[in-house]
Amino acid sequence: MEKGDKTRADIEMIAMEMASVVGLEGLSFGELAAEADMSKSGLFAHYRSKEKLQLAVLEHARERFHIEVISPALTKKRGIPRIRALVANWVKWEDGAAGGCVFLAASIDFDDRPGMTRDYLWKTQQEWIDFLARSSRLAAEVGDFNFNADHEQFAYELFSLMLGYAHYKRLLGDKKAGQRQKAALERLLTQYSRETKEKDNASQ
Amino acid sequence: MEKGDKTRADIEMIAMEMASVVGLEGLSFGELAAEADMSKSGLFAHYRSKEKLQLAVLEHARERFHIEVISPALTKKRGIPRIRALVANWVKWEDGAAGGCVFLAASIDFDDRPGMTRDYLWKTQQEWIDFLARSSRLAAEVGDFNFNADHEQFAYELFSLMLGYAHYKRLLGDKKAGQRQKAALERLLTQYSRETKEKDNASQ
DNA sequence: GACAGGCACGAACGTTCGTGCTATTCTTGG
DNA sequence: CCAAGAATAGCACGAACGTTCGTGCCTGTC
């Protein structure tokens, strides 16, 4: 009950890296076994189905995400400083993995493929978005944002900017992606902290 | 030299739909042949390699994209009206395909896989982004936008919002995705058309 | 020293993949 | 209307896929 856990942890670390490149569905026991220096069957025995492997990889990634992105941001002051930290950590997370954020790679694979894997993926992403919205609410509470800002709208726009960064960086190979993302974040923060004078309203 | 073209066009229409769901790499001759009511080998003969099939599908998609998204927007007045039309047409395009925008589905597949397909994909996406930036420049020229706005930054942010819409709609199944996207677009347009009073600057 | 369990292995399964070849059928220009 | 050529089908291949099976290590317990 000792060795197995260690092996699984090792496997999932490698698997997460691979999945970020080829996607969760593109992940195969054969290639993964080769990368982990194991036999395909020996590796398979740890999970007993591809779906269970995918779930294990996602669970592993979720843990890493908390450790690398969320937790360190919680040490920052509530409001804009914490939001900045979240974005900075996420960019590091995206840049760190060989193929970018594994959740984004998996999302495309599974948006049309129902099942347990998709459900877990959905839950994880929703959690992240809710966390962004909550951070916006906190920012309003400490006076950094307009107190009547639409926090879910903020989460949508912030999340979109992250998607944009990943896309510019990965596919387009744009050197200015970081610069663009920073400028966009500044603009977004400015707008949400402005002295609310616009007549616009997010409903309808 | 007549029948073949018709058949290829039919195939590529179906293939584009399939690829939007399973990705360009997930597309297979077997399934595509079944869907098109042809034999695998008969279909294969039209393209003679998977890569050529993928390229053909992308070319087909590029044509459709011009017809459905770009051309109808060109009839609108330069500036904000045209930008609004572009976004509205793109949303229709995204909603219309079974699995969403085929270029986005393909992007994840190929961002780590060099080759002709990736190059073509890159070119097409870059074209689209450049077109967005050019539309922003036009908006500045007709007085809708600040004349000193950063048009490539605008393209980045607008493109990001589209990515966000696709993600919210496809994976998260968010009913409010359309509403969110509209609100975000309004905010973005407002910001770029404002009387430029901010001290902020996109460089650094 | 026999026994049990956890762990990993190699071989093989049925299926699907992309890709060739060889016929056969269909379309079309002279 | 017929020959030429294009379009499609049939069949086979080697490889990779997920999965199953039987077996052999180790390591610790009675």
Image (tube, coloured by chain):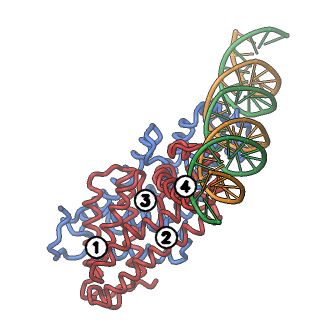
Chain colours: A blue, B red, C green, D orange
Q: Is residue A66 visible?
A: no
Tell me the element at label 1: helix
Which of the marked residues, 3 or 1, is nearer the chain's N terminus? Answer: 1
Which of the marked residues, 2 or 4, is nearer the chain's N terminus? Answer: 4
Dot 3 and dot 1 within a common chain: yes
Q: Chain of mark 3?
A: B
Which amino acid type is shown beneath numbered disc 4? Leu
Dot 2 and dot 4 within a common chain: yes
- Residue drawn 52% across the image and 53% down it: B11
Which of the marked residues, 3 or 4, is nearer the chain's N terminus? Answer: 4
Q: Chain of mark 4?
A: B
- Residue drawn 58% across the image and 33% down it: A49
Name the quadrant containing residue D6: bottom right
Residue named by callout 3? B101
Residue named by callout 1? B84
Dot 3 and dot 2 within a common chain: yes
Which amino acid type is shown beneath numbered disc 3? Cys
Dot 2 and dot 1 within a common chain: yes
Q: Chain of mark 1?
A: B
Which numbered disc covers residue B125? 2
**3D distance between C-alphas at marks 2 and 1:** 19 Å
B91 and A18: which one is in front?
Answer: B91
Tell me the element at label 3: loop
Tell me the element at label 2: helix
Which of the marked residues, 3 or 2, is nearer the chain's N terminus? Answer: 3
x, y percent for residue B83? 31, 76
x, y percent for residue A193? 26, 73
Residue named by callout 4? B24
Which of the marked residues, 1 or 4, is nearer the chain's N terminus? Answer: 4
Task: Point out the image quarter for the C terminus of chain A.
Answer: bottom left
